[in-house]
DNA sequence: TCACAGTGACTTTTT
DNA sequence: GTCACTGTGA
């Protein structure tokens, strides 16, 4: 009865509609790139409320990014306004929400502040002064990973997963300290709710009764701890619907567990699977390029995207000399787009590593190409901003040791390390918070330290009083934050730094003050400002996104986005993928390639440079093995032919002790030695392209020889014999 | 307490 | 090549 469906359902395709109307206990929606998964999930929420009489407050929808959560809320509410009452949050924001509501049961102060990895490192460094900061940083990474897997310091599996014998001891020490300062880290926002639900029957029952329907977006990026949390949330017979694409799982290095999605049907028996394979974004020719590469992966559920849009230009591959040529090529593509009536913002330039953006940043202003960089701004990670935030965090949680140490002497007031040690001791032995303990200990300090500390404390109580003062119309938190950054001396301190280093620190502080104007002037306003910043560092950089400019972005950051023109740059062996990536890691890189390519709506361009500067050194490279995994018939090669590696005199290899065999300082075997049976002039036969002759053979560090073949048809293509069986020497 | 130079490291990073 | 951390010396 399609004609009786309300319009918001009638416009769905049959698979999407089936997913929306599914009634069973668990549903896995395998949604390929561009198949309308956000639409399905938001429509499903609206459908449940509108058609199935679900109470919106019984619906929990979790995502991984704040942007996705906002989009979900807006789109669901646009169909059915009551949906706004559903709980739609990121995993971490849900965790914080849950912990603040159940703080007592969880053994937490409801005012806890959330530590980012920098704060975590500082906390641990304070415990392990004999270790360097970077050692502490890698220990924190290990601890965070352990939390991703839901492992506690006394979990038996901990030693199996982490080889460092000190791990258990350090992890325990860190946890104790974190508890003492009444802070939580990001991992805790997932682990602590899970632990509470597991251990507290009353909380568990109450929570399970509240959330009868749980939906998860980007499920392929969930980690083990998040999976555990979901299982507990849904354990009381709630319905669970997860949406994801195993081919887009690109955060394994951060603890994402692809097996969460691969084994979902086994863990939740009775799961129905709906596949969304119709792609509404790209042309088939683009999807084929992505599909060719990702289909080489072994661990996948397997699906094939079918484009709804027919036709379209053939994706192209530009083989370029070096980064300068790459920048020029990208500039040309951008200009052509604009000349043809498009906008700068139609084009996105994608790269794997942030460092690759530099070349574009340097040249684009000169070439007159407006650009914006997505992701790298890290406004809230900047020194001056973190300083101001530390003052605020301390007002919120006076036990926050990391924040205390950060600002008690910044700008310097004569309270040095020795004095700080005395104050920390006093707090530890008295069980008082740091500010109260400091107030009581100030007298035992001498001279500058004493007066400096008193100034610091009176500043904080001043601000505290200003926060709590009776409401005045039109006053926002900005007023207090401004007073804080001025009377603390932070503005003056950083303005001086600006003059020395030519930085913009003072104006960044101004921007922070502006951001605070969205919150009320009250202790609650401050707490909510801090939590928003802790959980969503993106807000301040978002304003520039409406300008007409080319987008520079890492491939990871493009997930969920789309652009008319996508240029995926740096498709070189050693960069993408790296030479040391094998097995699971290599498969993850293929998925990253898949994500990058499927962002393109109309036009896909790939670039690969012969020479690449990396860590200040110039390396001679070979095309990415991913390029050899694409059917050559799918790509139009647009730029000049790449010189083969190890041949010809180049300014970079000439004069080297290794002759032509050295590439950018890396000794490699000569082509002849590494070529195996392959050598120039050899007659070959290819399953798809027929007879041909080898033009060149170049060795690669990890992929075996790269063989360039010219076929009798005139086609020229390159292959890694290690990865294809289609090419073989011709039998005489 | 600060400023400077030497040393080494250096993918990706929703929260 | 760049940045951040470390240790030294004033």
Image (cartoon, coloured by chain):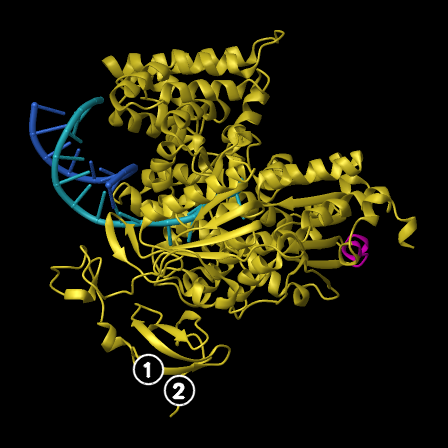
Chain colours: A yellow, B cyan, C blue
The percent position of residue C1, horizontal first and vertical second, equals 24, 41
**Residue depicted at x 63% and y 40%:** A69
Alpha-carbon neighbours of circle 1 within 10 Å: few (<14), some, or many (≥20)? some
Q: Secondary structure at mark 2?
A: loop
- The main secondary structure of the magenta stretch is helix
Please tell me which residue lies in front, A730 or A720. A730
The percent position of residue A350, horizontal first and vertical second, equals 46, 47
Label 1 and label 2 in one chain: yes
**Residue depicted at x 25% and y 73%:** A671
**Chain letter belonging to callout 2:** A
Please tell me which residue lies in front, A115 or A359. A359
**Chain letter belonging to callout 1:** A
Is residue A331 at all visible to an observer of this figure? yes
Q: Quadrant of residue A714?
A: bottom left
Q: Please say whether residue A19 is one of the residues in the magenta stretch.
A: yes
Q: Secondary structure at mark 1?
A: loop
**In this rendering, would B7 be left or right of A148?**
left
Mark 1 and mark 2 in contact? Answer it, CB < 8 Å. Answer: yes
Q: Which residue is mark 1?
A: A682
The percent position of residue A236, horizontal first and vertical second, equals 74, 53
Q: CA distance from mark 1 to mark 2?
A: 8 Å
Q: Which residues are magenta?
A: A17-24
Is residue A150 at all visible to an observer of this figure? no
**Residue depicted at x 74% and y 59%:** A26
Identify the mark at residue A730; answer none if there is no mark. 2
Q: Please say whether residue A68 is one of the residues in the magenta stretch.
A: no
- Count of numbered circles on the image: 2
Mark closer to the chain start, 1 or 2: 1
């Amino acid at each position: 009865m399609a004609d009786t469906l309300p319009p918001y359902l009638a416009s769905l395709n049959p698979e999407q509609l089936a997913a929306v109307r599914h009634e069973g206990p668990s549903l896995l929606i395998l949604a390929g790139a561009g198949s309308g998964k956000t639409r399905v999930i938001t429509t499903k929420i609206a459908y449940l409320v509108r058609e199935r009489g679900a109470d919106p407050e019984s619906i929990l929808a979790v995502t991984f990014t704040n942007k996705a959560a906002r989009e979900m809320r807006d789109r669901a509410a646009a169909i059915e306004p009551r949906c706004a009452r559903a709980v739609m949050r990121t995993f971490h924001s849900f965790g914080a929400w849950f912990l603040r509501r159940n703080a007592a049961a969880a053994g937490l102060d409801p005012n806890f502040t959330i530590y980012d990895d920098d704060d975590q490192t500082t906390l641990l460094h304070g415990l392990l002064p004999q270790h360097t900061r970077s050692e502490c940083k890698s220990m924190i990474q290990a601890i965070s990973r352990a939390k991703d897997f839901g492992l506690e310091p006394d979990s038996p599996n901990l030693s199996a997963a982490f080889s460092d014998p000190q791990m258990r001891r350090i992890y325990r020490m860190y946890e104790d300290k974190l508890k003492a300062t009444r802070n939580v880290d990001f991992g805790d926002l997932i682990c602590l709710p899970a632990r509470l639900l597991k251990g507290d029957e009353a909380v568990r029952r109450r929570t399970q009764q509240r959330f009868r329907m749980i939906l998860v977006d980007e499920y392929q990026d969930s980690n083990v701890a998040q999976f555990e949390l979901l299982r507990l949330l849904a354990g009381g017979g709630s319905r669970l619907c997860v949406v994801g694409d195993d081919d887009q799982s690109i955060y394994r290095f951060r603890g994402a567990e692809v097996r969460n999605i691969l084994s979902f049907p086994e863990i939740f028996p009775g799961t129905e699977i709906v596949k969304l394979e119709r792609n509404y974004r790209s042309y088939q020719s683009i999807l084929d390029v992505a599909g060719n590469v990702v289909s080489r992966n072994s661990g996948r559920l397997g699906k094939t995207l079918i484009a709804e849009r027919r036709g379209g230009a053939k994706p192209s591959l530009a083989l370029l000399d070096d980064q300068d040529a790459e920048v020029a090529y990208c500039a040309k593509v951008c200009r052509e787009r604009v000349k043809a009536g498009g906008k700068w913002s139609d084009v996105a330039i994608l790269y794997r590593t942030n460092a690759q953006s530099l070349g574009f940043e340097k040249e684009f202003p000169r070439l007159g190409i407006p650009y914006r960089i997505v992701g790298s701004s890290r406004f809230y990670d900047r020194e001056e901003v973190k300083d101001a935030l530390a003052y605020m965090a301390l007002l919120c949680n006076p036990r926050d040791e990391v924040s205390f140490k950060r600002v008690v002497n910044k700008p310097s007031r004569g309270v040095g390390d020795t004095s700080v040690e005395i104050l920390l001791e006093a707090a530890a032995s008295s069980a008082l918070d740091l500010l109260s303990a400091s107030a009581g200990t100030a007298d035992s300090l001498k001279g500058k330290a004493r007066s400096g500390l008193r100034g610091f404390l009176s500043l904080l109580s001043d601000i505290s009083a200003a926060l709590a003062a009776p409401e005045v119309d039109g006053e926002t938190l900005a007023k207090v934050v401004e007073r804080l950054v001025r009377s603390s001396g932070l503005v003056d301190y950083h303005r001086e730094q600006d003059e020395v280093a030519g930085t913009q620190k003072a104006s960044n502080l101004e921007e922070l003050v502006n951001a605070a104007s969205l919150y009320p002037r009250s202790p609650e306003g401050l707490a909510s400002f801090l939590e928003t910043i802790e959980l969503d560092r993106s807000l301040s950089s978002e304003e520039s996104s409406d300008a007409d400019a080319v987008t520079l972005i890492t491939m990871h950051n493009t997930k969920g986005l789309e652009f008319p023109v996508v240029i995926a740059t740096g498709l070189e062996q050693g960069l993408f993928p790296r030479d040391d990536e094998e097995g699971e890691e290599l498969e993850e890189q293929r998925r990253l390639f898949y994500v990058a390519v499927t962002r393109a709506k109309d036009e896909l361009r790939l670039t690969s440079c012969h020479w690449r500067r990396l860590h200040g050194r110039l390396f001679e490279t070979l095309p990415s093995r991913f390029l050899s995994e694409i059917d050559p018939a799918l790509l139009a090669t647009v730029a000049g032919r790449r010189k083969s590696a190890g041949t010809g005199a180049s300014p970079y290899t000439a004069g080297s002790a290794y002759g032509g065999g050295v590439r950018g300082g890396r000794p490699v075997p000569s082509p002849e030695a590494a070529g195996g049976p392959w050598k120039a002039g050899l007659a070959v036969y290819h399953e798809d392209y027929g007879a041909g002759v080898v033009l060149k053979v170049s060795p690669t560090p990890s992929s075996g020889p790269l063989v360039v073949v010219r076929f009798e048809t005139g086609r020229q293509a390159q292959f890694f014999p290690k990865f294809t069986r289609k090419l073989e020497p011709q039998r005489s």
